[in-house]
């Protein structure tokens, strides 16, 4: 039964059981959302005398409504919209409908990719009681490997169900079943495995559809935060993510943190058999990749320092680059541009980029500074630098990323950001493991975001 039918049926039943409270269930609800303007310009140099430049403007955002709680039941919905305007001849569709264009076969910059859209990105029913809750429908999910990735116009979202139990001792357990995924530049909820592999889904998994079953255990108490996730996708891939972070506040103005992470991905079932064949999508290589990372931060008043190191292990006998089709950016050294921005486009699951290629060591340093102390409140700057090195054939030079952000926030509602991104030797790898590089990529973004909420 489709989730919309279940949602409407549950609404009808609950209204019959609590007719007296039905009106207040909605009248006491909360509306919220945001209005966002986004400008992006991307310039590329392939090192052979060929350069490209593309840009785009769009305005849109989200409008959400969540009912009050009635006998533990809540309903929620969110409309999401992106509306481009004043487009040039060469359009950067990464804030419009890029995934729609890729899925249609027109490509990432054709007419379909340039069209704006509005989509019901969230529509769910949720039941809560004591320490337990469960939701069913569509929601924006934020986990290390299935994420909203909200650095562009709209978030990605999933369809399915998730249950959570949060205990007083700081332990939280979650489990779910997800069968559809809407990429942030799409208005379609596509089968979650089909989205990852596209036309190659049956050749890899033996089926044209599938699911992901995530389960996690988290701990947050006494300055320690720890997570252990297992994402099981039958006949495709199993991914395990674990990390632990310790935070300590030295005084009212000073604190530090240290953390470590490990990620393991393996093809399983039919995919493990099919990918091992010589004529497979990966040229006879199963998915087998392991990565680990370390990080540390130090904050004093409005100043912050951050450092991280990651290593994706090299395995010459396997597809050893991380598989991230659902907008996860889990590595501590991730930059705005370091995860292949379009790996989560339809059918691109086995692509990878820079920090996520097997054999890559990454180093990231960042410094942030607020300016409230000067009497000019609301301003903050962030400067981040990362370098990725790899000895594999085709990775000719180290890649260097620099991100600079100037942000102004007014009264917690309006945020304006100016972002500059400079990447030297931008590295990508296709499905067969062949590394290709741009000489440089430069990107500028202007983002204005106004948030609102009733009550």
Image (cartoon, grey):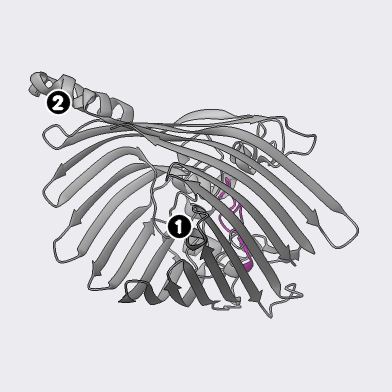
Q: Residue at x 65, y 48 (%)?
A: 445
Q: Nearer the viewer, residue 435 or 376?
A: 376
Name which quarter of the figure residue 351 lies in.
bottom right
Q: Which residue is drawn at 13% across and 62% down?
A: 168
Mark 2 sits on what residue?
A: 14
Based on the picture, tell me whether residue 111 belongs to the magenta stretch: no
Element carrying mark 2: helix
Based on the picture, tell me whether residue 348 belongs to the magenta stretch: yes
Q: Nearer the viewer, residue 100 or 30?
A: 30
Q: Position of residue 303 (x, y in %)?
A: 49, 69
Quadrant into which the C terminus falls = top left
**Residue most extreme to the right:** 49
Quadrant into which the N terminus falls = top left
> Is 275 on the left or on the right of 251, as rendered?
right
Mark 1 sits on what residue?
A: 236
Q: Which residues lie in the magenta part?
A: 341-354
Q: Is residue 438 visible?
A: no
């Amino acid at each position: 039964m489709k989730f919309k039918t279940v949602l409407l049926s549950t609404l009808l039943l609950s209204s019959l059981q609590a007719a007296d409270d039905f009106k207040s269930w909605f009248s006491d609800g909360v509306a919220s959302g945001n209005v966002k303007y986004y400008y992006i310009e991307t310039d590329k140099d392939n090192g052979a005398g060929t350069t490209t430049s593309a840009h785009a403007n769009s305005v849109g955002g989200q409008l959400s409504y969540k009912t009050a709680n009635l006998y533990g039941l809540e309903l929620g919905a969110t409309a999401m919209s992106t509306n481009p305007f004043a487009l040039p001849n060469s359009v950067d569709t990464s804030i419009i409908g890029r995934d729609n264009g890729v899925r249609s076969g027109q490509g990432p910059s054709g007419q379909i990719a340039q069209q704006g859209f509005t989509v019901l990105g969230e529509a769910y029913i949720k039941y809560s009681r004591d320490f337990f809750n469960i939701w069913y429908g569509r929601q924006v999910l934020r986990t290390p490997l299935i994420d909203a990735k909200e650095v562009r116009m709209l978030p990605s979202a999933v369809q399915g169900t998730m249950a959570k139990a949060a205990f007083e001792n700081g332990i939280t357990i979650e489990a779910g079943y997800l069968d559809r995924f809407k990429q942030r530049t799409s208005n379609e909820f596509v089968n979650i495995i089909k989205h990852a592999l596209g036309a190659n889904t049956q050749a890899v998994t033996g089926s044209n559809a599938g699911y992901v079953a995530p389960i996690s255990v988290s701990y947050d108490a006494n300055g320690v935060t720890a997570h252990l996730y297992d994402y099981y996708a039958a006949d495709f891939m199993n991914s395990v993510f674990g990390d632990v972070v310790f935070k300590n506040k030295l005084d009212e103005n000073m604190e530090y943190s240290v953390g470590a992470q490990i990620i393991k991905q393996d093809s399983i079932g039919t995919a493990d058999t099919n990918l091992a064949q010589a004529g497979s999508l990966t040229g006879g290589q199963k998915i087998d990749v392991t990565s680990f990372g370390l990080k540390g931060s130090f904050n004093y008043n409005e100043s912050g320092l951050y450092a991280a190191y990651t290593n994706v292990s090299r395995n010459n006998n396997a597809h050893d680059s991380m598989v991230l089709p659902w907008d996860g950016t889990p590595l501590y050294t991730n930059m705005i541009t370091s995860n292949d921005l379009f790996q989560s486009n339809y059918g691109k699951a086995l692509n990878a980029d820079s920090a996520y290629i097997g054999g890559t060591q990454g180093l990231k340093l960042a410094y942030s500074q607020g300016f409230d102390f000067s009497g000019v409140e609301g301003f903050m700057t962030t400067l981040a630098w990362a370098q990725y090195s790899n000895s594999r054939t085709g990775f000719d030079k180290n890649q260097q990323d620099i991100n600079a952000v100037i942000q102004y926030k007014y009264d917690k509602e309006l945020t304006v950001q100016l972002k500059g991104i400079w990447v030297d030797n931008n590295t990508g790898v296709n499905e067969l493991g062949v590394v290709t590089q741009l000489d440089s990529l430069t990107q500028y973004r202007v983002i204005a975001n106004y948030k609102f909420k009733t009550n």
